[in-house]
Image (tube, grey):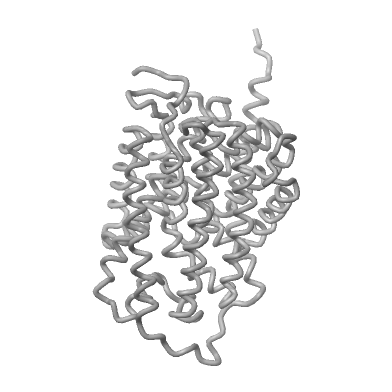
């Protein structure tokens, strides 16, 4: 196998935006509204606004850094360059572990929509097929992402039309109160799971044409599109299903269509959910593989993961390793639990992003330092107000990674005995 040291720049603004938007309109759009409403009730809309505001801070910081450091790895690279090796490692380790679990959740959600009785085998098959697509090159990945994104957007338009055209149900009774103002921040932390897809654009920095121009535009365009979709759906679902019904629903978009009298459209919504899961899974595998590649280049992960080769110049070993890890997790992953788990890891990742951007001396007028500080503080607040099980689980994984790296560094410094 021929080995290459660098990936090839093949993505333009449209492809990069599609990958980011495809990541944000993944399985989250079909499941995250219910647990968020259970926490915040009708104030779930406020949670969407809070999550969107913090995501904007993070997007600006990511755009600043990606334009300066157009290499694979995203905040792992930015943290190392601007803050030092340890902050970079924490960001990279949080991203790789959290998003690997998210890959399993996306694959399993796909399996439940397509073949509920055979969810795990179908999920494993999806991971295998999408890994093959990734190994065929980044342009094939971008093409399939655009196709899947088109299916998802058509599905969401159908849900919106059905919800607006159908009958409006009776409001909740006086005893049906759900959520509270205290749940706004935990719900925002869960909603942030839906806005984290633009990280995939930054992790592909080594494969983007004219990165100083393309990456900032793609990140902000993808975030703006996702924010409009999520806010619109939040308003529609709260109005059409009511907070109590929405909090109890396991498939809110499907329930909204059924309640509107368009039950024949159920299979179309199921197909859209399946496409969303595949689109997000495809982008996730790509992003995790690129971050693992960057970490291996710096010897923070095993060196073979840095191998880039094949006719399409892709990180072959990293892609295959991510796929193997996802398959290993599929039998134990719970979708709703992993949303919080992943959210905590990604919020820590973006707190490093904002801290790194804060230290930059050259910055555009649209990226003042106070915005980086607000993003840093907002990420930490959302991270530590998530459900305790999510915080404890991901904190333990981060601690294990830090301890492992510390021991490896000590071993490397130990003099050889003769």
Whether residue 162 sits left or right of residue 341 in the image: it is left
The answer to whether 414 is drawn above or below residue 214 in the figure is above
Outermost residue, front side: 365
Rendered view: 28 above or below 403 = below
The image shows residue 97, relative to residue 159, as above or below, that is above
* Quarter of the rendering containing residue 340: bottom right
**Front-lying residue, 193 or 405:** 193
Q: Is residue 338 visible?
A: no
Q: Using residue 282 as the reference point, say whether residue 197 is left or right of it.
A: right
Q: Residue at x 51, y 36 (%)?
A: 291
Residue 137 visible to the viewer: yes
- Horizontally, residue 170 falls left or right of residue 76, namely left
Q: Residue at x 50, y 44 (%)?
A: 218
Q: Residue furthest top?
A: 418
Total labels: the figure holds: 0
Residue 68 lies in quadrant: top right
In the foreground, 111 or 45: 45
Quadrant for the N terminus in the image: top left
Residues 410 and 311: in front is 311
Q: Residue at x 60, y 67 (%)?
A: 47
| x, y percent for residue 260 | 34, 80
Name which quarter of the figure residue 418 lies in.
Answer: top right
Nearer-the-camera pick, 112 or 278 = 278
Q: Position of residue 202 (x, y in %)?
A: 53, 39
Q: Residue at x 41, y 58 (%)?
A: 27
Q: Position of residue 173 (x, y in %)?
A: 51, 91
Hey, which residue is sitting farthest bottom in the picture? 174
């Amino acid at each position: 196998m021929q080995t290459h040291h660098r990936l090839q720049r093949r993505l333009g603004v449209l492809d990069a935006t599609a990958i980011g938007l495809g990541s944000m309109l993944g399985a989250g759009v079909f499941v995250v509204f219910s647990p968020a409403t259970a926490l915040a009730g009708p104030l779930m809309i406020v949670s969407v606004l809070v999550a969107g505001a913090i995501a904007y801070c993070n997007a600006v910081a990511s755009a600043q850094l990606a334009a300066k450091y157009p290499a694979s790895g995203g905040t792992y690279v930015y943290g190392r360059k601007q803050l030092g090796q340890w902050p970079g490692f924490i960001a990279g380790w949080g991203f790789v572990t959290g998003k690997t679990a998210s890959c399993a959740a996306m694959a399993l959600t796909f399996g439940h929509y397509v073949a509920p009785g055979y969810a795990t085998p179908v999920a494993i098959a999806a991971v295998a097929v999408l890994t093959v697509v990734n190994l065929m090159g980044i342009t094939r990945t971008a093409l399939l992402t655009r196709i899947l994104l088109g299916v998802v957007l058509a599905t969401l338009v159908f849900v919106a039309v059905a919800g607006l055209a159908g009958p409006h149900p009776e409001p909740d009774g006086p005893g049906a109160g759900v959520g509270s103002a205290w749940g706004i921040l935990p719900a925002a932390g869960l909603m942030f799971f839906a806005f984290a897809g633009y990280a995939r654009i930054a992790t592909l920095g080594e494969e983007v044409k004219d990165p100083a121009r393309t990456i900032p535009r793609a990140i902000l365009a993808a975030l703006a599109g996702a924010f409009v979709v999520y806010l619109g759906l939040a308003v529609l679902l709260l109005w059409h299903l009511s907070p109590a019904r929405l909090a109890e629903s396991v498939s809110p978009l499907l329930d909204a269509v059924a309640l509107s009298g368009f039950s024949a459209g159920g299979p179309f919504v199921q197909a859209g959910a399946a496409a969303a899961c595949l689109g997000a899974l495809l982008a996730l595998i790509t992003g995790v593989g690129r971050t693992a590649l960057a970490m291996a280049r710096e010897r923070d992960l095993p060196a073979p993961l840095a191998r880039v080769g094949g006719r399409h110049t892709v990180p072959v070993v990293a892609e295959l390793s991510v796929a193997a890890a996802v398959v290993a997790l599929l039998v134990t992953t719970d979708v709703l639990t992993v949303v919080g788990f992943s959210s905590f890891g990604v919020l820590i990742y973006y707190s490093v992003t904002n801290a790194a951007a804060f230290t930059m001396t050259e910055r555009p007028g649209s990226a003042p330092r106070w915005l980086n500080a607000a993003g840093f503080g907002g990420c930490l607040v959302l991270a530590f107000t998530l459900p305790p099980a999510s915080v404890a689980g991901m904190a333990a994984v981060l601690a294990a990674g830090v301890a492992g790296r510390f021991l490896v560094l000590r071993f490397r410094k130990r003099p050889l005995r003769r």
